[in-house]
Amino acid sequence: MKRRDFIKFSTVAGVNIAATQWSDIALAQDAEEPRRGGTLLMAIFPEPTTLFSGASVINQVTLFGTKINESLIALDFDFSMKPMLAREWDIAPNGLTWRFRLRDGVKWHDGRVFTSADVAFTMMEIWKKLHPRGIQSFRNITAVEAPDPGTVVFRLAAPIPFLRTELSAFDATIFPKHLYEGTDILNNPYNIKPIGTGPFKFREWVRGSHLIAERNPDYWDKPKPYLDRIVFRIIPDPAGRAAALESQQLLIAGPNPVPLIDINRLAALPHLEVGNRGSEYFSPMIYLQHNLKHPILGKVEVRRALAHAIDQNFVVRNILFGRGSPASGVVSTYQKEAYTSEVARYPFDLKKAEALLDAAGLRRGADGVRFAVTLDPNTAFEQYVRIAEYLRENFNTIGVKVTLRTEDSAAWVRRVYTNYDYDMSIFGTVLLADPTVGMQRFFYSGAISKGTPFVNSSFYSNKRVDELFDLCRTEVDTKRRARYWHEIQRIIQDDLPVIAIVNQEYTNVINKRVRGITVSPHSLFENFAGVWLSGI
Amino acid sequence: MQFLRRFAPLARQRLWQGALTLAAVIIFNFVLVHLAPGSPVDVLAGEAGTSDPARAAALIKEFGLDKSLPSQFLDYVSNLGRLNLGYSYRDSQPVLDLILTRLPATLLLMTCAIVLSLAAGILIGVTAAWRVNTPIDQASSFLATLCYATPMFWSGLMLITIFSVKLGWLPSDGMRTVTFDEQNAFALVLDVARHLVLPTTSLALFYIAIYSRIMRASMLEVSRLDFIRAARARGLSSTAVYYRHALRNALLPVTTMAGVQIASMLGGSVIVETTYGWPGLGRLSFEAVTRRDYNLMMAILLISAVIVIVVNLLMDVLYCLIDPRIKHGTEEGR
C-alpha cells in the first residue's frame, strides 16, 4: 500500500521511471533471504572533518554518523513514526507533552547501558545548544524529564508540528552522556572516534584514505546487522568515483556521486542501479534568487519577465539529464503536506518576456541591451554553473545582458550572504521534510541575517508571509497548516523574490549486489542494519 | 675534507639566503591566504547548506577570526617562534600531525616519479643522441612531444580507463587495499606498489619528455667538444668515451632541471593525487585552500618552501660532486 502511494506520488514528481525500477527491485529483494557477512565498499566525499553529527549537518558527517549513533524514532515513507530506540510513544492531544518508552537492553559500544538520561542530556546540551538546525527546531522544548531509566518526557512551551521528522536520524542522533557530560563538547576526543548504540562500531579513520565501521555483535536488533563492516573510501575526484563504481572497487555511492553527464552511462551498465528512491526526506531544489535592492530587479514585472524566459524542461532534459522535474513554486513536490500546484505559472515565452520588459519601460538601447546584471552560481556542484550559463544565453536574447561570475564556494557564500554584493544568484538547497525547517529561512523577513549563509539574502519582506510562517511554526492541525502553506506559495510565486527552477533528485549509484538499502526516506543516511550483500 | 672546505662558504651563503627567503615566505603566505574572500566559517556553513547566527558567531570566536589581522599575524609568528605550526579547527588536529600523516605518501610518490622520469628520460635521451636522425630518434621525439603536450589529469583518466576499468589490472585509486586479514610485509609492499604504478606513470610522463629532450641536446653538444675528441684520439673505445666522458658531463643540465622540478612536482602532485585519491600532501593542500583552513594552508606553504630551499642546497652539493671544478658561487671556465 505504502509502496503504491509512493509510486503514485513520484509520478507526480516526474520520476516515475526510476521509481518503478526501484520498486521492482525492492519487491524482488523482499523474496530473498538476507545473507550474513561481507564488506560494503562505500564512497564518502569530500573527507569529513569530524565524526560528531551533534554539531554538524554536513552530509558526510551524517552519512557516517548514522551508522554509529541512532535516533529515538525512524520514519516510514509517508513520514509516519517507526520505533527505533523508542519502542512506543504517547503524544498529548494539545501537542505539549511527548512521552517515549525506550527499548530495553540497549548498550553503548563501550558496554554502558543506554538510558533516558542520555536522551535528556543530548536534547538539552547538544541539540538545543550546538546543532545548527536543532537550535531552531527544538526551541520550544523547554524541559526534558527522565522519570525512570526507560522513560523520557519532552515538555513543550508551544506545539512543534514538525517534531516527528526532526527527531529522526538525519538531525537527531543520541550521544552518550557519560562521555560528553562536563566536557568541552565541540573538542571532545570521542568526536573523531564516536561511541553509539548503532549496528556498526567505529574502528579506524586513516586520513585521506578511508574510514571503517565494523559490525556490532551486541546490536539490539538481532540477527542484524548482516554486514561484517562498511569501508568508507575517500575518493575526491568524481571521475575517480565513476571509475571505481564501474570496476566494482566501490559498491555504493551517493548522493550525486558522479557528474550528471556520466549518470546515464553508469545506469546503463548491467551491474549498476541508479535511483532516487528513498530520498524523499531531502527535497532538493534549485533556486534563482534576486537581490531585491537592485534598482531594476527590485521591480516585480522584471522578475516575472525573467521567469518567462526560463525553459524549465530544457534544464531538466539537458542539464539534469532527466534527474529532476520542473518546479511550479518554492515548495518541493516531495513536501506533500505543504505542496500545491495552484499558483501563478510563468510558461516559457520569450515574446511575452520582451513585452513585459517593454511595458516596464525597459526598452532595448541602440546596442540591443535593456539592462545589465551579474549572475553568481554556487560552484559547489557543476549543474548550478551549467544552468547559469544557460540563463545567460536566454536572458541575452531578450536584451538582458548577463555577466557570469564563478568563484569557489567560500567566496560565493561571502559575496551573497555577508557582502550582499550580487544581483542574481543560483544555488541548490535541501528543503527537508518540513518547510518550516528547510524553506522558511529563505523568505521570512526575520531570517535576514548578515553573515549567515543560506538564509533570506534577497531582502524579501512581506507581512502576510511572515504572519503565515509564524502560524505554521506551531499549527498542529494538518489541514489548516496546509492552507497556510498554500497561501504562502501563492504569494511568493506572485512576488518572485526567488524563481524556483527545478526539483532536483538525489541520485545514488548502487551495485546490484547490495540489498536492503531502501528502507526509509533517508536513503543512504540510514543505519544500514538491514543491508546485505548477495552473491558473495 | 677537501670537499667540505670547498663547500662551507657556499653552505653559509645559501643558509643565510634561505633564512631571508623563509621570512619573506611567512609574511607573503599570511597576506595571500587572508586575501582570499570567504572564511572557514563561510565554508562550513556552505557545506552544510544551513547555519544559525549564534553558531556562526561562536565559530568565528573559536577560530580566532574575531581578532584584527595584525594581531592574528602576531599570534601566528609567535607560535612559529615556538615551532608550533598551529591547529586546524576544521580537522580538530594540530596542523603538524595532519601534515606528517600525509607527507610520507607524497614523498613516496614523488621519489618514484623522479626516479622513473630521470631513468627513462636519460635512457631515451642518450639513445636518441646515440642514434641521432634515425627512426629511433624521431620516434622518441614524437613520444616526448606527445607526453609533453598531454595534460596530467587527462593522461591520468586515460590510464585509469584502460588499466583499471577496461583491463582490470591495476587499482584506480587509493594507496593500499583496505584489508582485515594479517598481511605480511611482502604482500603489503606489493599492494602499495600496485597502487603506485598508475599515479607514478601519470606524474612521470611529463618529466620523461622534458628530461629526454634535454639529455639528447646536451649529449649532442658535449660529444662535439674537444676533450671527447682527445679521448677518442687516445684510443678509448667509443662506448667508454660515450658513457664515461660524455654522459657524465652531459648530466649537469638534467640535474639542474631535476632540482627545479622537485619543487614544481609538489604542485603537479595536487592533480595526480586528486585523480587517483592518493592520500598525500598535494590533496591536503588543495582541500586546505577550498576550505580556507588558514593554519593548514600556511603550514603547507611554509613546509614546501623549506623543502625547496633544502633541495636547492642538496643540488649545489651534487653539482660539486659531479663537477669538481665548481666552487663557491663561481664556475671556473672549462
Image (cartoon, coloured by chain):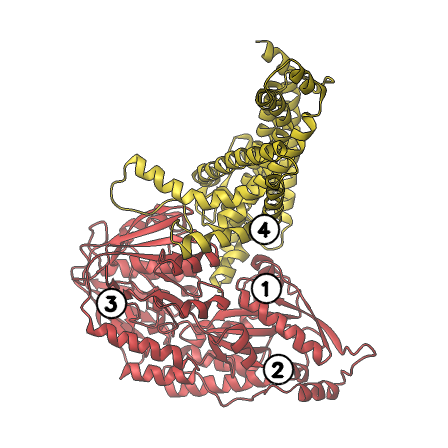
Chain colours: A red, B yellow
Chain of the residue under the numbered disc 1 shown in the image: A
Discs 1 and 4 lie in a common subunit? no
Label 1 – label 4 distance at C-alpha? 37 Å
Position of A470 relative to B134 (above/below): below
Residue A65's mark? Answer: none
Chain of the residue under the numbered disc 4 shown in the image: B
Numbered disc in front, either 2 or 3? 2
Q: Nearer the viewer, residue A437 or B292?
A: B292
Instruction: Give the left or right position of residue A54, taking residue A370 as reference.
Output: left
Q: Are marks 2 and 3 in contact (CB under 8 Å)?
A: no
Q: Nearer the viewer, residue A487 or B303?
A: B303
Q: Which residue is mark 1?
A: A417
Label 3 – label 4 distance at C-alpha? 52 Å
Question: Label 2 sits on what residue type?
Answer: Ala
Q: Which residue is mark 3?
A: A84
Mark 4, secondary structure of its residue: loop
Q: Are marks 4 and 2 in contact (CB under 8 Å)?
A: no
Mark 2 or mark 3, which has the lower sequence index? 3
Question: Label 3 sits on what residue type?
Answer: Met
Q: Is residue A79 visible?
A: yes
Chain of the residue under the numbered disc 2 shown in the image: A
Q: Are marks 3 and 1 in contact (CB under 8 Å)?
A: no
Numbered disc in front, either 3 or 4? 4
Instruction: Give the left or right position of residue A158, taking residue B147 as reference.
Output: left
Question: Label 4 sits on what residue type?
Answer: Pro
Mark 1, secondary structure of its residue: helix
At x 21%, y 64%, the residue is A147
Instruction: Give the left or right position of residue B88, taking residue B190 as reference.
Output: right
Discs 4 and 2 lie in a common subunit? no
Numbered disc in front, either 1 or 2? 2
Label 2 – label 3 distance at C-alpha? 45 Å
Discs 2 and 3 lie in a common subunit? yes
